[in-house]
């Protein structure tokens, strides 16, 4: 997860700043009227509420931070009533211990809804909420974006306004049934061998061999490596849950060499400032350089290594419930997705014709 900064620019334009990644550049290029400013190394887009909403949708996995000067420039965003509504929602999200990124996204969804509604949300009817979500679906907004918009409305109407009847039958967007990208074991081997240096090789090896998320890997501390038990302690994973995962023998050897060469003090992979860990964008660049050198699928990301870890464990016959525990999935159905991308073992499959012909031969 990264941070997308939106500030006021010149000539009625918004300045959009973020740490470089190919995915973010591809996203901003989808905004009509965008411009790249090489001297300032920033992007700009025409100032409009539609542009802000499009940025929010395109960078759904990042935290979008809107400068106060941008908020103040919009009469709708600055209205006292809107501020009270958003503040009430944010208070509920805080009490539920939602992450800062989720709170930012839900606040922006509420602002979008209020601009569309143009009246006191407490007076809205179920039909208004349905019409809003249906319009989003008709306009081709992504399924994940619409689901999050619906989730924000549910929290507000159910817990803040205490009007659950208004959200009892809201439409939703079907989940996109996309299979995860998985690298072969040979591609994983080539990728790890193509790392720039010991630090990069150690990082990529840990991500794959333990099935770590990017945020989990970059925040590893020295004390999280339990070498005597061959385990890694993951603190504050998705859903703020702790868990243990496996520490491979090869990863442990690399970690020992990594410690001798870099002498980390707190974070296992410190950033430019020793008191902070490497950023997610830096971690993705480590993967990108190794991926290009190894000449493997250009769509592969760090999360692809996690997908590959789970799939390869299934191929090796590891029980899926153990894999669920290692990955930190709350629902077994999430882990079951990997059964659809297993490498077919065709040599073990016999045609039913052969089976019943064998039976006839035995009868004779």
Image (cartoon, helix red, strand yellow):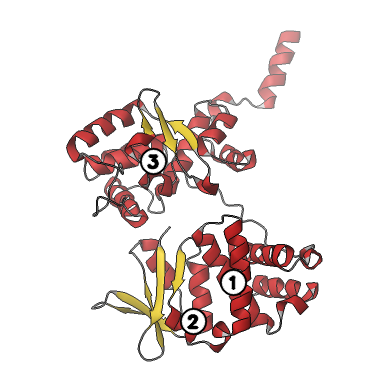
Question: Residue sitting at 51 percent across and 64 percent down?
Answer: 60
Mark 1 or mark 2, earlier in chain: 2
Q: Which mark is residue 87?
A: 1
Q: Is residue 276 above or below residue 231?
A: below
In which quadrant is the N terminus drawn? bottom left
- Where residue 204 appears, x then y in whole percent? 33, 42
Mark closer to the observer (2, 3): 2
Question: Residue sitting at 67 percent across and 73 percent down?
Answer: 138
Number of numbered callouts drawn? 3
Front position in the image: 80 or 187 = 80
Q: Which residue is mark 2?
A: 71
Would you call the spot at circle 2 few (<14 residues within 10 Å), some (14-19), or many (20 or more)? some
In which quadrant is the C terminus drawn? top right
Question: Residue sitting at 27 percent across and 32 percent down?
Answer: 254
Q: Is residue 112 visible?
A: no
- Where residue 274 appears, x then y in whole percent? 25, 50
Q: Which mark is residue 117?
A: none
Q: Determine whether, in the image, residue 139 is placed left or right of residue 127.
A: left
SS for tag 3? helix
Front position in the image: 101 or 16 = 101
Q: CA distance from mark 1 to mark 3?
A: 38 Å
Q: CB atoms at circles 2 and 3 under 8 Å apart?
A: no
Front position in the image: 54 or 328 = 328
Would you call the spot at circle 3 few (<14 residues within 10 Å), some (14-19), or many (20 or more)? many
Q: Determine whether, in the image, residue 309 is placed left or right of residue 147.
A: left
Q: Which residue is mark 3?
A: 207
Q: CA distance from mark 1 to mark 2?
A: 15 Å
Residue, far left: 261
């Amino acid at each position: 997860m990264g941070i997308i900064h939106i500030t006021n620019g010149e000539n009625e334009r918004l300045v959009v700043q973020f740490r470089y990644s190919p995915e973010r550049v591809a996203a901003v290029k989808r905004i009509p009227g965008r411009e790249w400013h090489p001297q300032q190394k920033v992007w700009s887009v025409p100032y409009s509420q539609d542009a802000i909403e499009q940025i929010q949708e395109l960078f759904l996995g990042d935290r979008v931070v809107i400068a106060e000067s941008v908020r103040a420039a919009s009469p709708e965003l600055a209205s006292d009533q809107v501020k009270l509504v958003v503040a009430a929602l944010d208070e509920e999200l805080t009490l539920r211990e939602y992450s800062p990124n989720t709170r930012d996204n839900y606040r922006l969804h509420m602002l979008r809804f209020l601009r569309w509604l143009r009246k006191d949300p407490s007076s809205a009817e179920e039909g208004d909420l349905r019409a809003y979500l249906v319009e989003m679906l008709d306009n081709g907004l992504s399924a994940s974006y619409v689901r999050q918009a619906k989730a924000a409305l549910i929290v507000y109407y159910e817990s803040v306004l205490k009007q659950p009847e208004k959200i009892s039958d809201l439409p939703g967007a079907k989940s996109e049934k996309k299979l995860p990208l998985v690298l072969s074991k040979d591609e994983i081997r080539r990728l790890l061998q193509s790392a720039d240096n010991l630090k990069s090789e150690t990082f990529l090896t840990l991500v794959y061999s333990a099935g770590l998320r990017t945020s989990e890997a970059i925040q590893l501390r020295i004390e999280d490596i339990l070498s005597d038990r061959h385990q890694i302690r993951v603190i504050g994973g998705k859903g703020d849950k702790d868990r243990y995962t496996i520490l491979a023998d090869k990863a442990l050897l690399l970690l020992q060499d990594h410690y001798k060469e870099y002498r980390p003090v707190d974070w296992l992979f410190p950033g430019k400032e020793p008191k902070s860990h490497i950023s997610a964008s830096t971690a993705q660049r480590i993967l990108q350089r190794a991926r290009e050198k190894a000449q493997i699928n250009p769509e592969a990301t760090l999360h692809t290594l996690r997908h590959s870890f789970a799939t390869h464990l299934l191929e090796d016959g590891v029980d899926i419930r153990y894999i669920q525990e290692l990955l930190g999935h709350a629902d077994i159905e999430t882990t079951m997705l990997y059964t659809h991308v297993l490498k077919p073992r065709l040599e073990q499959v016999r045609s039913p014709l052969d089976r019943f012909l064998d039976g006839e031969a035995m009868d004779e």
